[in-house]
Each structure stands twice: as structure tokens, then as C-alpha cells.
Image: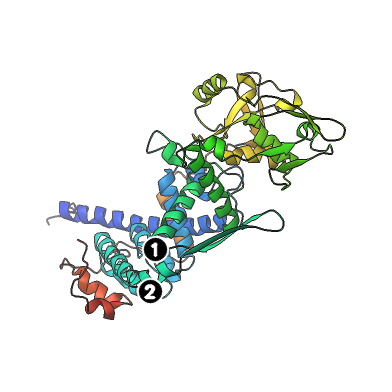
């Protein structure tokens, strides 16, 4: 009797199994990514990142170690999926890859996501990218037909309200509005990172008070930064530092102690808090005026800089940007650790650089900063906790793949090697035909003599 030993698997079969394992694990990772995006969306909406960080993306960059651009994209996709349940479910089941979903969320709406879902299931990631580019091209054509009407309705009104607030109302042309929106987004998300020397920079954790507020308040802060930046870079060809100034009148006792009676007003009479005046006086030109008991001006001193130019150069050379943990922005203001109105000296050891928003956080929002005996700066939240709070690394199972599969089995998710495989069989892709069939404006596009195809 001849005994046959089991023959080893054919090399091709081994490779097939290896490929199946790669595909199955990739689908598991996509399903886990859907859960991650769901958590990010909830964390962002509830403002869990607002503990000294400027945005949810900045927090992710610090806590998880993502590149800031990748973190912003995660937040964008997470927000988009909140209104796109079909795409969210397909990702959660591992049927669509994160790359496909990320691309589709650039154009998908609740009305079009069902059509775009079929694109994601049928084609490869490259096909999805090409169709989305073509889709956006058709959208731009439809918008161009309305450009003339929009141009006629442009307007901007700026006026002073009864309580001293400045009110803006207006309508801008799409290209001007897009420019403004991009500028506001840059101010909110990067605080003008164009001033940085490298394209890829340290994560910006700038604002401690930006994005938990309503969008209107966020935009107001961004617009203030844009105005300040424009004047700082000489928007007016003359002498912008002289022609455009914010003048504050404050009594010396109020500057030293906000509880003391006295004035703290802008030029024109609008009241501001003593804390705001202290912040502005940290790094500004100073003119001391003395009055007699009847309020008559009896003496005025020459204008001086709170921080002399030579000392400022040394300060910029030492700090190289905002010193708030994780910020590093180049566009900064000098801050007295102990205010000069309280007797603090204007010396290098008593100064540090802070960006505009973090300077406000220290003066008006209760954040604290002090220099330790070793020269290091210590920042604390309003409740006294140190900032940032360094967390220990997350615990990782000995076999993370096995743990991930077990977690999905408990959830009833059945993932296999064909879960995320597209139905594409290698045929060529006609982007123009696909857009004609899928896009809601297909009828108007078909009548056009030319067709926009991206390849």
C-alpha cells in the first residue's frame, strides 16, 4: 500500500491566500475607520478639543500624531458623513475604502449620495477620483450661468451699532466670496501659516476660544486677524502704523488694577474692559498725559515703545514664535509675564511672544503663564491645571488584528476578502458618459457642444 503525504499548497494558492488576508484586513480597517470618524465627529461637536487647542484637527495632530493636513481631512470627512448616512454605512461595513469615501464626500449631498455610492461600489479609487473631478466641473458650469445676476447684487455695508459694536452686512460675488472664505479659513485653521518658513510646520494649537463658539463668532475672530495682518504687512502704501491705529485711553490706576474706578475706552468713547486695555498695553506705543484736578491737560510726554526695537529683536530671536504649547505662530505680540503697570520690568526674562488669540486667552480668559526658575515657561488653564496635559500612550493588544476581528464579530459585522472589492472588470472608463448619467444637471450638460472630461 502506498501512502501519500499531503502535498504543500501550490505557491500561487499561497499568494492568493495572502492577497485575501490583505483584502480582508483592509476591509476591517475601513470599518474601524468609520467608527473612528464617528467618534471624531462627536468629539468635535461637543468641543472636547477646546482645552488649549485651536481646533479638533490640531488636537488630533497632537494626541494621535497625524500630520495636520491629514487631521483636517479626517475632521472634514467626519463632519460630511454626519449628513451622508449611505456612505457612512458603506464605510462601516467595509464595502467602501476610506480613500473612496474621502473623495466622494467632496461632492456628495443627501440628494446625490445614492448615485455616488454606486460609483464607489463599481469602480476603483482612481475611477472615483476622475468622476468626482468631472462632477465638480459640471457644477462650475451651472454656477457660471448665474454669475451676471450675482454681480449686480454685490454690496457691503459697515456701520456702528448703538452698543459700540461694528455691524457688517453684505453680499459678495462668488470669486470674491471664495477669496474671503478661504482667507477666513486660513485665519481660523492656520493663523496665517504662510508666514512660516517651511511648508510643513509644527501643528498649530493656536486658539483656546475659537471653534466651540458659534460659527459667526469664529468668523468674527478670523476677520479681526485678517485686518490686523493686512495692516501689519502694509496694506496702505503710506505709513499704516501711523494712519491706522487703535487708540485706547485708560487711567493709570485702572491699568494697574481693574477693580479701580476710572476710564478704559477706545478713541470715540467705546468702553473696553481693563483686561483688554492691559493686553493692548503689553506691546504698544505709550503716551503719558497728566491732568489737573479739573481734568485739564497739563503735560504730555513723548511717545515711547513699551518694548524697544532692540529688545524686540532679541525676543523674536529667542522665542521664534508664539510660546503657547503647540502653537509656534510667527505673527506674534510681546507679552509681559508681570505687567509693566504692576511694576514688571521690560526685560527679556519678563517677556514672551504670544499670538493674538493666546495673548487674549492669558489676559481675558483666565489662562496663566509664568517663568520657572530654570527659565522654562509654565502654562496653566483657568482652573489651574497644567497645559498641555500629557497622556500616556493608548494600550495596544498583543495581537491587534485578532482583537479587531473579534470586536467586529461581536458587532455582527461579517467581513471577508471580497467585501470591499469593486465590480469593475477592467473595462475603460468614459467619464463624460458617467457624468451624463449620474449628475442631476445631465440634461443641460448633454446639450453643451463640448464636454469636460478629466483623465
Q: Closest to the observer: 100 or 365?
A: 365
- Residue plotted at (42% across, 40% down): 194
**Secondary structure category for the residue under label 1:** loop
x and y percent of residue 5 in the render? 17, 52
Residue farthest toward the right in the current orientation of the protein:
293
Q: Closest to the observer: 106 or 335?
A: 335
Q: Is residue 102 above or below residue 148?
A: above
x and y percent of residue 311 in the render? 57, 20
Q: Is residue 96 above or below residue 254?
A: below
Measure the C-alpha gap from mark 2 to mark 1.
11 Å
Asked whether, in this view, residue 360 is left or right of residue 233, the answer is: right
Q: Is residue 447 above or below residue 20?
A: below
Label whose residue precedes the other's in the sequence (2 or 1):
1
Asked whether, in this view, residue 428 is left or right of residue 25, the answer is: left
User: Can I make out residue 301 in this image?
Assistant: yes
Crowding near pointer 2: few (<14 within 10 Å), some, many (20+)? some
Q: Closest to the observer: 406 or 80?
A: 80
- Residue plotted at (55% across, 39% down): 243
Q: Which residue is mark 1?
A: 105
- Residue plotted at (26% across, 72% down): 435
Crowding near pointer 1: few (<14 within 10 Å), some, many (20+)? many
Q: Which residue is mark 2?
A: 112
Q: Are marks 2 and 1 in contact (CB under 8 Å)?
A: no
Asked whether, in this view, residue 241 is left or right of residue 201, the answer is: right
Please tell me in which quadrant of the rendered image residue 337 appears. Answer: top right
x and y percent of residue 30 in the render? 39, 58
Quadrant of the snapshot with the N terminus = bottom left
User: Can I make out residue 396 in this image?
Assistant: no
**Secondary structure category for the residue under label 2:** loop
Q: Is residue 370 above or below residue 271?
A: above
- Residue plotted at (33% across, 72% down): 145
Amino acid at each position: 500500500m502506498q501512502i501519500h503525504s499531503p502535498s504543500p499548497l501550490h505557491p500561487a494558492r499561497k499568494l492568493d491566500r495572502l492577497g485575501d488576508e490583505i483584502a480582508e484586513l483592509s476591509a476591517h480597517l475601513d470599518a474601524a475607520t468609520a467608527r473612528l470618524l464617528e467618534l471624531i465627529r462627536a468629539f468635535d461637536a461637543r468641543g472636547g478639543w477646546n482645552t488649549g487647542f485651536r481646533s479638533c484637527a490640531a488636537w488630533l495632530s497632537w494626541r494621535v500624531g497625524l500630520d495636520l493636513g491629514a487631521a483636517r481631512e479626517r475632521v472634514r470627512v467626519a463632519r460630511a458623513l454626519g449628513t451622508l448616512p449611505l456612505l457612512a454605512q458603506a464605510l462601516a461595513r467595509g464595502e467602501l475604502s476610506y480613500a473612496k469615501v474621502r473623495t466622494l464626500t467632496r461632492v456628495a449631498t443627501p440628494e446625490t449620495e445614492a448615485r455616488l455610492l454606486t460609483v464607489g461600489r463599481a469602480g476603483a479609487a482612481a475611477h472615483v477620483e476622475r468622476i468626482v473631478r468631472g462632477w465638480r466641473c459640471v457644477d462650475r458650469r451651472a454656477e457660471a450661468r448665474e454669475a451676471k445676476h450675482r454681480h449686480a447684487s454685490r454690496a457691503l455695508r459697515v456701520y456702528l451699532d448703538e452698543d459700540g459694536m461694528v455691524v457688517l452686512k453684505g453680499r459678495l460675488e462668488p470669486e470674491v466670496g471664495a477669496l474671503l472664505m478661504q482667507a477666513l479659513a486660513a485665519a481660523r485653521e492656520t493663523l496665517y501659516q504662510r508666514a512660516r518658513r517651511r511648508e510643513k510646520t509644527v501643528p498649530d494649537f493656536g486658539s483656546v476660544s475659537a471653534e466651540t463658539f458659534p460659527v459667526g463668532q469664529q468668523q468674527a475672530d478670523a476677520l479681526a486677524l485678517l485686518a490686523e495682518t493686512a495692516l501689519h504687512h502694509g496694506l496702505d502704501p503710506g505709513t499704516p502704523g501711523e494712519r491706522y491705529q487703535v487708540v485706547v485711553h485708560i487711567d493709570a490706576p485702572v491699568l494697574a488694577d481693574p477693580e479701580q474706578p476710572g476710564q478704559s475706552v477706545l478713541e470715540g468713547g467705546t468702553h473696553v474692559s481693563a483686561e483688554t486695555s492691559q493686553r493692548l498695553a503689553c506691546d504698544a506705543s505709550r503716551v503719558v498725559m497728566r491732568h489737573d484736578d479739573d481734568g485739564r491737560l497739563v503735560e504730555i510726554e513723548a511717545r515711547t515703545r513699551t518694548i524697544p526695537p532692540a529688545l524686540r529683536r532679541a525676543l523674536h530671536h529667542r522665542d521664534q514664535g508664539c510660546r503657547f504649547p503647540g502653537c509656534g505662530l510667527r505673527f506674534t505680540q510681546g507679552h509681559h509675564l508681570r505687567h509693566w503697570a504692576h511694576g514688571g520690568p521690560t526685560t527679556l526674562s519678563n517677556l514672551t511672544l504670544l499670538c493674538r488669540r493666546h495673548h487674549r486667552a492669558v489676559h481675558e480668559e483666565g489662562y496663566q503663564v509664568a517663568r520657572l526658575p530654570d527659565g522654562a515657561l509654565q502654562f496653566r488653564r483657568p482652573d489651574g491645571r497644567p497645559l498641555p496635559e500629557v497622556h500616556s500612550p493608548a494600550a495596544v493588544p498583543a495581537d491587534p488584528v485578532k482583537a479587531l476581528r473579534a470586536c467586529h464579530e461581536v458587532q455582527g459585522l461579517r467581513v471577508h476578502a471580497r467585501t470591499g472589492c469593486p465590480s469593475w472588470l477592467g473595462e475603460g472608463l468614459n467619464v463624460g458618459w458617467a457624468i451624463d448619467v449620474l449628475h442631476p444637471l445631465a440634461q443641460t450638460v448633454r446639450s453643451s457642444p463640448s464636454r469636460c472630461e478629466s483623465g
